[in-house]
Image (tube, rainbow, N blue to C red):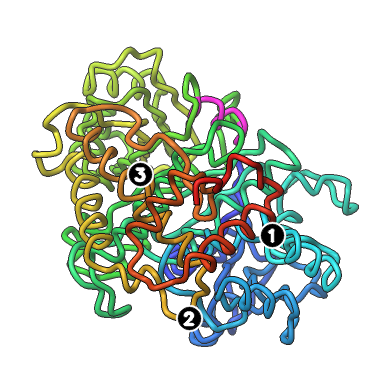
Amino acid sequence: MKLCIVGIGGCGGKLAANLLENQDTPLMGKSLGSYICFGGVKGMWLEADVQETSTQTFFKALDTRLDTYQPFYFIPHDALPSESRTSRLLQMKYGYDLKKQGFFRQAEFLKAIFEIFDIDREIQETAIEETSFDNPILRGTWANIRPYTTLAGTNDGRNSHGLCDGILFVISLGGGTGTGFINPITSYIRSERSAYPVFVLGVLTENGKDFQQNTEESKRDLSAVISMHDLLVEPRGKGIDGLIIVDNQILKQRFGGNYPFMDKFIYQSMKPMLAERHFPGEDPGSLAVRELFLENLNTPPILVPCYTRGKNGNPVEGLVKDALTNGRLFGCEPRKAEKIYIFARGFIDSKELQYAAAAQTELDPEKIAVWRNVGNNRSNEVLILLRNPYGSAEAFKHEGTVEHRLHRILTMALEYISENRDELLQAGMTERTNLALEAYFYGKKGLRDILTLALSRIEHGEKPIFQDPLNIFEVLDAEEYAEVKAISERSLEEGQVRAIVEELLKEKGLLKENHCTAL
């Protein structure tokens, strides 16, 4: 398995820099040979803020003239010209400014923008006239990722040997840039190859206020649950194939808040999965891993990583026990896992790994898959991914469980929704956007209702936690319209509100007699 690493946003960029570090010996800052990442992976960093890119030195500005690989950064909205008619039209109709530096630190920002590009024919046509593509942001982004994947194949004159057979997006689950980008770009990938493996490594930010970004925990938790909801409810073959979650709160306690060291530890933990020196017959490829991640599931699983490293010759039982007991990167109860996937580096017997994990979790050995990579002769490493290790009633009351952690962030997110209406319905947005946002957050079957139901499902030990997709620019029928109007605190004239709703429906080609007839 060889993955294309795509870091998105600030946290994603820092982690990607570790994953893409040059393994070749440098001299005077230059590589003595080709740029070689661990596992032969390749990748890049997607960022929305030019200032963020100017304060780092690892990633280079994208230069398509270079023949050799080097990790580069790409600013997606640079796909639109500086005086973009598409951007001006989007701002005029919806209030979103695509050409501003950086994005709002809210997951719904990019979510809304990509929905608009999907539904608004006028914006699509303007973008095609201006750039030849109906969604130049996604098109430009995928055009830069694709050459490093096997999907490039012979279409661009390259041999697929050495190219990546899957993608690992790396994001923070509490930010804004990365969280709203993955599902739209995954849909783009799926339109070309429905089964192409796409995985996500998502880092949940720690408790308390983030003083660097000056954001409260509840606001970051709202972004986190929006992100997790959207990633985990897409049907099989339309969304991602697995969400690997890491809790920075655990790493902060373990490493005393040394963030560079925390990032390096996440990288170290992922090395058994990324290594390319496989034992004979144990290189399944990303597609086979994808199939096992999704086996008997209709939606993507949560995968909790557990990692340990020990001296060569240490008992396998001790390594597995240490990984499951002390090496969890997200609080969980391993015995609740549906399936287990083990990636190992070193000279370890695969059957011993399988039966040691079965003994620790009481899981049928047939539900435990093992892949080994050759390591060095000094140490052995074990990465264990636990699939959906949650689902017990009352477990949310016990610290150190998936249920407890997710219950906390759901509660905080609901608190933020209840207390920050004015911020969620942002100044500068058009009335049509704020009407859509109000329905999304506060309407019947809106986000508040979905998260309340998810909280109940956690408390009752039900799987999956999230069930139904939710878009911001949904079609409003008469009943939903009346409810949104009833809870609205704005003083719009009746005709203005109706005109906004009808215009939204017309743009979707969905204006029918039974829509809004009760108004």
Sequence-first disc among 2 and 3 = 3
Residue 291 magenta-highlighted: yes
- Image: 287 above or below 364: below
Q: Position of residue 313 (x, y in %)?
A: 30, 34
> Element under label 2?
loop
Other residues around mark 3 within 10 Å, as few (<14) / some (14–19) / many (≥20) = some
The kind of residue tagged 1 is Asp
Residue bearing the label numbered 2 = 428
The image shows residue 419 at horizontal and vertical percentages of 22, 66
Left or right: where 123 falls relative to 342:
right
Residue 31 counted in the magenta span = no
Nearest the viewer among 184 and 291 is 184
Report the amino acid beneath label 3. Answer: Ser
Residue 209 relative to residue 167: left or right: left
Q: Which mark is residue 120?
A: 1
The boundaries of the magenta stretch are 285-294
Quarter-of-image position of residue 182? bottom right
Which residue corresponds to mark 3? 379
Judge from the rendering whether residue 319 lies leftward or rightward of residue 56; answer left or right. left
In this rendering, the answer to whether 56 lies above or below 173 is below
Q: Nearer the viewer, residue 320 or 187?
A: 187
Residue at horizontal 54%, vertical 33%?
235
Question: Camera-side residue: 202 or 462?
Answer: 462
Q: Cα distance, mark 3 to mark 1?
A: 56 Å
The first of marks 3 and 1 along the sequence is: 1
